Image (tube, rainbow, N blue to C red):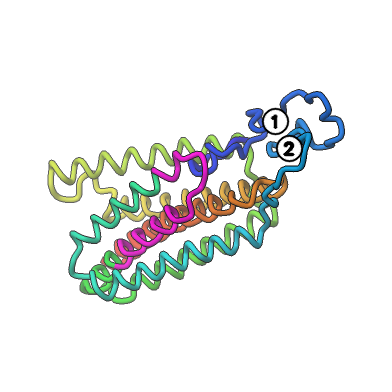
Amino acid sequence: MRSSNPVFSRRGFSRDTGYAGFNAPPQAGGAANPYAGTNPYATQAPPQYTPQTRPMTMDDVVTRTAMTLGTVIAGATVGWIFLTGALGFAVFAGLVAMGLGFAQTFMRRPVPALILAYAAFEGIFLGALSGAINDLPKMGGAPMQAVLGTMAVFVAMLVAYKTRLVRVTARFTRFVIIAALGFVLLSLVNMLFMVFGGGDGLGFRSGGLGILFGVVGVVLGALFLALDFKQVEDGIAYGAPREESWLAAFGLTMTLVWIYLEMLRLVQILRD
């Protein structure tokens, strides 16, 4: 099954595309490899010795994810302390993070420096935004509630995935992608109405409709977590190169940022 996460969809974490020999007919001399034709990372044995990168492990994914999330937290600390009143620079940092994220998404190989730079700028944006919201009337402590909510969603989805209460199938993936595209499209339309029409746009960010929209955003983030877990599981099972753990960390970080932003918006609406 092809990944719905743009980070992975260009990397061959797939059961149906023939990438790197997966589902490809056996080549001459390939009989010695029992995984040829089923493993996207299985290749014909070279005629002479060639150094190979060891396969990705769960420890690799956990370590890289801790590094990227740690960088986000460090950037958020800087943004909270020094840039709470400079939202213009915070927005700039957010746009830079978006550009770096897109750049990594469309690269054929992970670039750790690029991923960590994305995490740093994303953290600065989140920290400054969270600090500004925390200083608003009746919003004290809202960012911490959003953090706790994000952690709860992560743990709940991890348990649901490991116990197979949530099963990632082709139909599940299509549903999540279609729902996410619709959500993003409605958000963009609402933003345009806010910019050109003033006020609250179509009302997707306030009142009862805003609460419903926020809940949908959090649920979509949780479903994307399930897709991320599936890609990590497949990458380890198929012997993905160790460098792919950076992409796994990148994908998980982007999803957690999505959930945090939606959770923060939801908490803000409920408190307002």
Q: Residue 167, position in %: x, y? A: 65, 46
Three-letter residue code for mark 1? Gly
Which circle marks residue 64 in the picture? none
Q: In this view of the protein, can residue 219 be seen by the observer?
A: no
Query: Which mark sits nearer the N-terminus, 1 or 2?
Result: 1
Instruction: Please provide the residue range marked out in magenta.
Output: 103-127
x, y (%) of residue 271? Answer: 30, 68
* 150 or 122: nearer the viewer: 122
- Mark 1 is surrounded, within 10 Å at the Cα level, by few (under 14), some (14 to 19) or many (20 or more) other residues, namely many
Residue at horizontal 27%, vertical 71%? Answer: 131
Question: Is residue 144 in the magenta section?
Answer: no
The circle on residue 42 is: 2
Expressed as whole percent of the image width and height from the top left, the position of residue 26 reads: 79, 25
Q: Secondary structure at mark 2?
A: loop
Quadrant in the picture for residue 146? bottom left
- Is residue 239 visible in this depiction of the protein? yes
Q: Residues within 10 Å of mark 2 (few under 14, many from 20)?
A: many
Q: Which mark is residue 21?
A: 1
User: Which residue occupies the extreme right position in the image?
Assistant: 32
Q: Is residue 121 magenta?
A: yes
Decide which of 45, 209 is in the foreground and name it. 45
- Secondary structure mostly seen in magenta is helix
